[in-house]
Amino acid sequence: MLAILALVTAASLLPAGPSPAGGLAVSAGDVTDRRRNDSFFAGLEIELKLTGEPAAGVRGARATVEKAVDDTGRNLVKENAEKPDFAKSSGDEAPSLKLELRNPARRAGRVRELTGQVELFVPERDPAALAKVPRFAAQMDRPIAAPALKTAGAQVTVVSRKTYEAEKKKDAERRKKEAEGAGIAGAMVNAFAGLFEGMFGDIGENDVLVRVEDKGEKVFSVDVVDAAGKAVDGMGSMKVGGFWILKFLEPVPADAGLRIYVMTPKAMITEKFALKDVALP
C-alpha cells in the first residue's frame, strides 16, 4: 500500500507514569497517529495533560520538544518547527497541549523517549501581570498608559470607529504622506496600510479594534470587561498583523473597560518534562 490509513485513537502513558517537574505533572493523553506516505496529512500528534499545584491558575501554556525518538531509533522532531502559540485555558483547569511530531517508523510501537519543556502563564503570581483599563472608550486612539505595558515594552491602543473609517478611505501612499495631517502617529498610519489591503473584510459594527505593538510578544490577552470587571461575552478574537479584532454580536457597554494580561517574568513557570514508552496505536 502507498499509505497506511490514518489511525486516530486514545492512548495513555504506560507504567512509566507522568513526568514530575517541580510539582508539575506532565502525562500523555490522546495520541493521533497518521503514518502515511504523503507529507500533507502525515504526522504524529501527542496530547500533554498538565496537573499538579503549578497548573492551578494557569491561563496559558505551551510546550516545545527537545527530543522525540520511537522504539526503532527514528528521530521524530520536526526540523525548523516554529515555536507554538500559547494555548489558553477555558476554565479553571490548565489547557491540554498538543505536540506535532514526524511519522514514526512503520514497525514502531512506542515513542521510546519524549522530552522538552512546558511554559505556564500564571498571572496570579504577579500583580504586575494585569493591567486594568476603566472606560476604554474615553482613551480611544491613544496608547494606554499602564505600568505593566511600559515594563514589557509594549503598546496597546484601542482604535475608534471614526479613525478606522477615516483611514479606510485613504490609499497607502496618502497615508504615508499625510500622517501628520491625519493626526495619527506615522507608525499607526503605516500599520493601517496592511489593515485595509484585503486581509479581511469589514470590521463588524460592534467589534473592538486594538492595535498591539509588542516586539517581545509579552501581551497575552486583551479582554473587554463590564464595570464590575466581568468579561463581556463575545465571539472570540482574531489577529491580523499588529491588530487584534475582538468580535461582538452586540454593542459593548458604554462604560466597558479592558483587562490586559502581560507575561511578566514572575508570572511565568518553565519546567522540563520527560516521558517514556508512550504507546502508539
Image (cartoon, grey):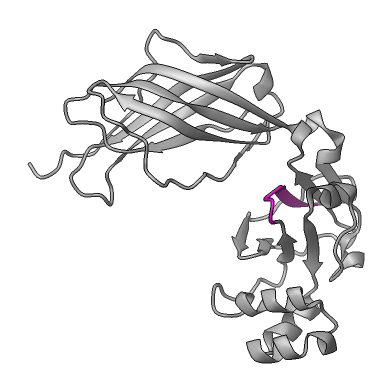
- When asked about the image quadrant of residue 46, the answer is top left
Question: In the rendered structure, which segment of residues is drawn in magenta?
Answer: 215-224
Expressed as whole percent of the image width and height from the top left, the position of residue 152 reads: 79, 48
* Marker count (numbered): 0
Is residue 171 visible to us here? Answer: no
From the viewer's perspective, is residue 187 above or below residue 53?
Answer: below
Measured as percent of width and height from the top left, residue 175 is found at 71, 87
- Percent across and percent down for residue 39 are 25, 49
Q: Residue at x 39, y 7 (%)?
A: 15
Residue occupying image coordinates x 63% and y 56%: 235
Which residue, as the protein is rendered here, is positioned at the far top? 15
Looking at the image, which residue sits at the far left?
Answer: 1
Q: Quadrant of the C terminus?
A: top left
Q: Main secondary structure of the magenta part?
A: strand
Q: Where is 153 relative to 67, above or below?
A: below
Quadrant of the drawing holding the N terminus: top left
Residue at figure coordinates x 57%, y 75% from the top left: 201
**27 or 5, nearer to the observer:** 27
Nearer the observer, 63 or 255 = 63
- In the image: residue 279, left or right of residue 205: left
Q: Is residue 236 magenta?
A: no
Q: Residue at x 87, y 61 (%)?
A: 136
Q: Position of residue 65 (x, y in %)?
A: 46, 33
Residue 223 is a magenta residue: yes
Image-quadrant location for residue 190:
bottom right
Indicate the quadrant where residue 270 lies. top right
Q: Is residue 175 left or right of residue 14?
A: right
**Front residue of 60 and 153:** 153
Up/down of 145 relative to 203, above or below: above
Residue 229 visible at all: yes
